[in-house]
Image: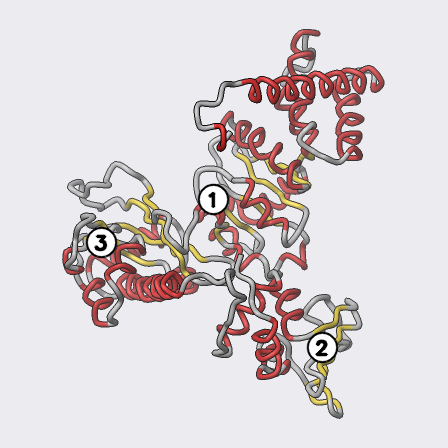
Amino acid sequence: MPRISRKCIDEIKHHVNIFDVVSPVVSLKKSGRNFVGLSPFTTEKTPSFFIHPERNMFKCFSSNYAGDIFRFIELYEKLTFTESVEAIANRFNQNLEYEQGFAPTSESRSVRKEIIEIHDRACDYYHRIFMSEQPISKKAQSYWVQKRKFKMQIAEKYKIGFAPQKDTKLIELLLKQRYSLKALKKCGLFYFRDQETDPRNLKPRFRDRLLVPIRDYKGQVIAFTARLLPFTQTDNPTHQAKYINSPETPIFYKSKVIFGLDQARHHIDKVGYFVLVEGQLDAIRCWQYGINTAVAPQGTSITEAQLLLLKRYTNTIDCVLDGDSAGQKAALRILPMALRVGLEIRFIVLPIETDPDSLLIEKGRGAFDQLQKQALTAIDYLIQALLPDKSPSPQAKAEALLQLFEIINESDLLVIQDEYLQKAAILINVDPMSLRGDFNRFKRKKSKKSIHKNQDYEKKPCNITVDNC
């Protein structure tokens, strides 16, 4: 990871004033030599947040947080120290200097910057088309309002776009801005032949589809999801796919991106948990109904990297599941990962053939809140999924317990393992001591298999030179 030089950090701190960093998010009033305002970290009626311009520091008495410009951005935006330095440098046009051997190459930095700018311009371009008075745009708007039941204000707020079937204007726009061929090829917005040298021959990836911008946690557009429309032409080569997505690029790695995190992280302190839904439009629907911490994985299922990203902001997730077998599979997939990264997870189970989008449209926020009140703890859902029969046979219990042990063993914390075992004993109606004994034997067998596996690996013949063995 890039390491910024101490000299650079000190210079940024010297040139950037704490007032300019804080004032965009806190309403400040003069108080002698200092400024005071309501804490951005807690809910309060009496101001207890002070900044000291002469010392370039802040102090929050309600949360007991204090520090410099970097510490404020770390806490408020929930960034790492390096990310906070880079964020302030970008906002206040300060140069970044990295320690020798730790800096990204100048070429990769410039191409990355170009790709970010290209996505920003593409987002504006596609959004303007969606909002225009053209007949094809009106059809896209009709789909958004009539078919999907979204308001146009939501499209404006989140810059929903439309990509026309035949389009050369985007590449013309980008060429006028003198973006490099390398950046245009790497940005993921175009198809091209590997040996292509003329940027005018690049073909738009997204055609005749609704576009949803994908943003990183800072709010920068880094990719798009493009949804099939009822009038998407059948000669479109991607017509069979309901969704097509940006490929991975220097700024977009789908397994490490959470849709909606740029918005949801600013509301997490108010409720304490994320609401994890399946798709982007589900998340947007949740936002429309005031469920402001709704997020979605970028892809078909959540990854451990995405869970770690969420854990930076809270230890609690409410996972919304379909009430069918697909929902059950999703739960059994996410739970072991959640235990590994140390997240507490609850499951909101929806009726069969229902998703958050349709539930909120048909029954409103109250129906969702009621289901959330009935959310199942991880162990409750796990036992229900593994033993759906209320009177299971001893063999069914044994098989379920093996799966249960596999999942519980993913946690490194004995206190978590103990809690899950105690609850499982009650739910399955077995003796807690016997269950603990079975679990300990399971762990010993698993440990022995791991040891034998490593020994077998070491005994394998080496087919390379002795020096490299």
Where residue 208 appears, x then y in whole percent? 23, 50
Task: Give me the C-alpha separation between circle 2 and circle 1.
Answer: 36 Å
- The residue that appears at 39% across and 66% down in the rendered structure is 106
CA neighbours of label 1 inside 10 A, class few (<14), some (14 to 19), many (20+): some
First in sequence: mark 3 or mark 1?
Answer: 3
Question: Between residues 141 and 421, which one lies in front from this camera angle?
Answer: 421
Looking at the image, is 317 positioned above or below residue 251? Answer: above
The residue labelled by disc 3 is 204
First in sequence: mark 2 or mark 1?
Answer: 2
The residue labelled by disc 1 is 255
**Quadrant hosting residue 34:** bottom right
Q: Amino acid at mark 2?
A: Phe
**Quadrant hosting residue 117:** bottom left
In the image, farthest residue toward the bottom:
32
Q: Is residue 149 left or right of residue 290?
A: left
Where residue 171 appears, x then y in whole percent? 21, 62
The residue labelled by disc 2 is 58
Q: Is residue 266 left or right of residue 415?
A: left
Whether pointer 3 and pointer 1 mark residues with C-beta atoms closer than 8 Å, the reply is no
Whether pointer 2 and pointer 3 mark residues with C-beta atoms closer than 8 Å, the reply is no
Secondary element at image label 1:
helix
- The residue that appears at 32% across and 46% down in the rendered structure is 227
Where residue 244 appears, x then y in whole percent? 32, 44
CA neighbours of label 3 inside 10 A, class few (<14), some (14 to 19), many (20+): some
Looking at the image, is 469 positioned above or below residue 78? Answer: above
